[in-house]
Amino acid sequence: MTVNDVLTVHGGTPLHGRIRVRGAKNLVSKAMVAALLGDAPSRLYDVPRIRDVEVVRGLLEIHGVRVSDGDDEGELILDPANVESATTDEINVHAGSSRIPILFCGPLLHRLGHAFIPDLGGCHIGPRPIDFHIQALRQFGAVVDKAPEGMHLTAPNGLHGTKLELPYPSVGATEQVLLTAVMAEGVTELRNAAVEPEIIDLICVLQKMGAIIKVHTDRVIEIQGVPRLGGYTHRPIPDRIEAASWAAAALATGGDIEVLGAEQVDMMTFLNVFRSVGGAYEVTDMRPPRNGSPGQEGKIRFWHPGGELKAVALETDVHPGFMTDWQQPLVVALTQARGLSIVHETVYEQRLGYTEALNSMGATIQVYRDCLGGTPCRFGRRDFKHSAVIAGPSKLHAADLVIPDLRAGFSHLIAALAAEGTSRVYGVDLINRGYEDFEAKLAALGAHAERS
């Protein structure tokens, strides 16, 4: 954290205006990794200017991929014609800054026959072990040698299709299997796979490259390995996490925010809860140009219609459940709802630590080890505080806040905007990992905030 990594926020002003979301953070970075597999350039549109994209771009470039900006804003061209090994020191420059390097394993093993993965970083919301990844890679035929500086992987006999079943439908492990299986010899069957919209969009990217992937019912994905893949041209799905974050900001501050680029189809679960709490929204579908008339960009307008917000009980879950990355921003709005709201977090075991900061601002939130408001989950007997009860409405007041992770950071920012008085938010650069130009967007919405 640097001296300038502080945002002074003058709260109490409803946010009003229009902002735009681009391609989903959780797809764009993975599509960039997929370009490693091709023998021709790939073109990716609507890429947000966020830290995670910079990290992946750096990792690709040190491995010989030429990454250049296209003519359109947010367009990247990725040319993997000269993939090469990178030194341990070069790779370690990125160690600790992202968890993306683990997904380089399969593509590098296919292209080079070996890979090195440094220690992994990311948000501290639970251990997020890479055991699923390593076990899967070994089943494909990879040999994993652990060293103090990271892991060295080789595939002396090549990679071969296999049958796998994940103990939990992990998004990262599913991505690992997809990126490895598409060029492994034979057929791979993955059971209990994640089927988030970003996973399906990654499958679309790989299919454009020449992959053969079947998505069956009951979380089963079948991949038939192919000997070569080409490039792709792709426009990713919009970032449903960022869209929901701004929706929560509108609700918490009593504002009205129009989110250009947001799409209804992947936000249906969030929209149901948003309306149940008392928020209002209006969907405008995208309309392509026709008969000389201009097209229309899709958007969703979110606003607080007045009156009291209502308490709800919700449970995070894998798709199509309520997304874990939606709960933190929404909880800030729930501090303003009348009654007792219950949140049962079932995806990450340590994702409710951010509520301590909200309590310091006047919220009344109690966390519990029990599975509240829903069915028992895998954390219920493991002594993790993974359920929360939020009593409201609470009048929030300004405080000094230190951002612990990406989504909690945006939640703290929303709380500072909703609170009376002037807050200082430390570590705001972490928000740049997943929210493009968030300070410019705040200004466009009428927020009073400036760097200290």
Image (cartoon, helix red, strand yellow):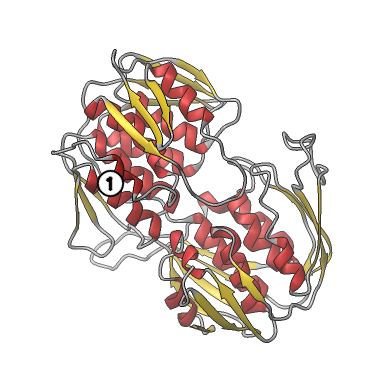
Query: What residue does disc 1 label?
Result: 90
Q: Is residue 106 left or right of residue 163?
A: left
Q: From the viewer's perspective, is residue 39 above or below residue 309? A: above
Task: Examine the image and state in which quarter residue 376 appears.
Answer: top right
| Front residue (pair 239, 175) | 175
Q: Is residue 59 left or right of residue 219?
A: left
**Which percent across, then down, holds residue 148?**
43, 35
Instruction: Work out whether residue 221 can be spotted.
Output: no
**Which percent across, then down, holds residue 168?**
60, 30
Q: Is residue 299 left or right of residue 342?
A: left
Task: Examine the image and state in which quarter residue 81 appears.
Answer: top left
**Which percent across, then down, holds residue 250?**
60, 73
Residue at the (28%, 55%) spot, across then down: 45
Residue at the (42%, 23%) spot, across then down: 137
Q: How many marks?
A: 1
Say few, some or many: other residues with alpha carbon within 10 Å of mark 1 (under 14 / 14 to 19 / 20 or more).
few
Provide the secondary structure element on which disc 1 rests: helix
Instruction: Work out whether residue 276 can be spotted.
Output: yes
| Front residue (pair 394, 19) | 394
Residue most extreme to the left: 81
Residue most extreme to the front: 148
| Front residue (pair 7, 71) | 7
Task: Examine the image and state in which quarter residue 110 appears.
Answer: top left
Q: Name the kind of residue labelled 1 in the image.
A: Glu
Q: From the viewer's perspective, is residue 325 above or below residue 85? A: below
Residue at the (51%, 36%) spot, across then down: 195
**Which percent across, then down, holds residue 21?**
43, 63
